[in-house]
Image (cartoon, rainbow, N blue to C red):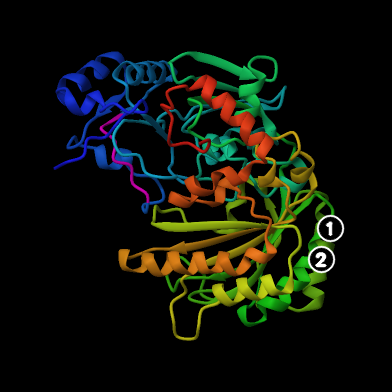
Amino acid sequence: MTATPTSPTGRPERLIIRTRSSVLAQLRDRIAGDVLGPGDAGFREARAGFNRLVTHRPSVIAIPENHFDVVEAVRFAAAEDLRITVQATGHGTGVPADGGLLINTSRLTAVTVDPVTRTARVAAGATWKAVLDAAVPYGLAPLMGSASIVGAVGFTLGGGFGWLGRRFGLGSDAVLAFDLVTPDGRPIRVSEASFPHIFWALRGGGAGSLGVVTSMEIALVDVTTVYAGNLFYPADDAEEIMRRFRDWAPAQPEALTSAVTILNLPPTDDVPEPLRGGSFAVVRGCWSGDIATGRVIVDEWRNWRTPLVDLWDEMPFDAVDAISMDPTEPMPVMVTTEWFDELHDEAIEVVAGRARPEPGSAPLVVSAEIRHAGGAIARGAARAANDRARSGQFLLELISMVPDPHVALAVESTLRVTRTELAPYVTGATYLNFTSGAERAGRAADAYSAEHRRRLLDIKATLDPHDRFCHGDIA
């Protein structure tokens, strides 16, 4: 017996019952973009995101060519009583969607910059690389994350903690307006002046719950050159380096956003020879103030202990990928996170012990990064939807690769045990962009205070009474 997927209203989804080909033909007649069903060429690729561990299995995929296609696709889903999932690059996918309509926004890539107002208009599928390429010629930069291949809109809806965060705030703080297609297919312009409650919810309340954001207007900042990079130390010294970082980072000006990381690099040709296959304790970050001042600040580490490899230097901001050195090819990963108000010695020992591999064994955690927050991130917390997700002092991200399904259970167990061991020392808050899969769905509520969560749920219930967008971060 085969289970029939149900709609948000509890009824079997009509697309499963009716003749699939006729229903797909109706949607194809309504939009300029592609419409794909299971078995169609390109279906598997269109449903796949960057994180290959989470795979949607929709009944139909719409790949819009423009804003109007999104409107028609949402109206189609409403008429057919289908759930809706939205995906651009698929970096932060939560629980995979089975059945319903997947709107793949990857073709909506337009970016325009107004150098006079220092703003950019960014379409739903554009990556931060596209925004950088448009902004840099004018001496401007976006509040982007650690990797330019990530989708700008999805990153921003989840908050968006990047290497300019302590000085300028989260990416969501830079948003001036959203173009939103509501769950009933109504296109609206959302800003502080129009629909202020929805504007508040979208700026950090997570993605995929209130409709489809087809574009956003963001403020850009005057940053062209930064002092940034990595200092590599032996992984055996990780505890000592983490303790020093804990005491050092809060004393630095807000122009510095920094982190300490235990990094286990693969023995592959794309890794520089001195680092290939090694494990390191890394002090990394980005200084966006006067370059000479930044060099003096980082010299405190060099004078304390000479690093094995020193890659911290002056660089154009559009080379920001060199800081985190995130992978660029799709892969299966598990990610988890915790916030600390204080970084206790015991917590440091847990993180170092779990992230540093035993001699001769492959690491289950490839990166354990503790990023220093505060500054403009914390100052904006009280008025932000995701208040708990930006109130702590230090943010931990654990990343594990899952190259084989047989490894998944071991990785999941390691991450779960690590979080259990850290439980006495953490705030319990969640930063949405550092979670994925079932954990993102299960812990999303912890990004918000009880008051803000109630407010978000009220907005969600009003805007999407049938819970058509049921795979987002507000539930």
Tell me where residue 196 appears, x and y as whole percent. 67, 20
Q: Quadrant of the N terminus?
A: top left
Question: Foreground residue, 299 or 183?
Answer: 183
Which residue shows up at 55% across the image and 44% down it? 444
Q: Which mark is residue 252?
A: 1
As drawn, is 268 to the left or to the right of 250?
left
Q: 10 Å neighbourhood of mark 1: few (<14), some, or many (≥20)?
A: few
Which residue shows up at 70% across the image and 15% down it? 193
Say which amino acid is labelled 1: Gln
Say which amino acid is labelled 2: Trp
Which residue shows up at 26% across the image and 26% down it? 35
Q: Is residue 106 visible in this depiction of the protein? A: no
Please provide the residue range marked out in magenta: 54-61
Q: Is residue 400 above or below residue 100?
A: below
The mark total stands at 2
Tell me where residue 474 appears, x and y as whole percent. 53, 35
Q: Which residue is mark 2?
A: 248
Which residue shows up at 54% across the image and 14% down it? 188
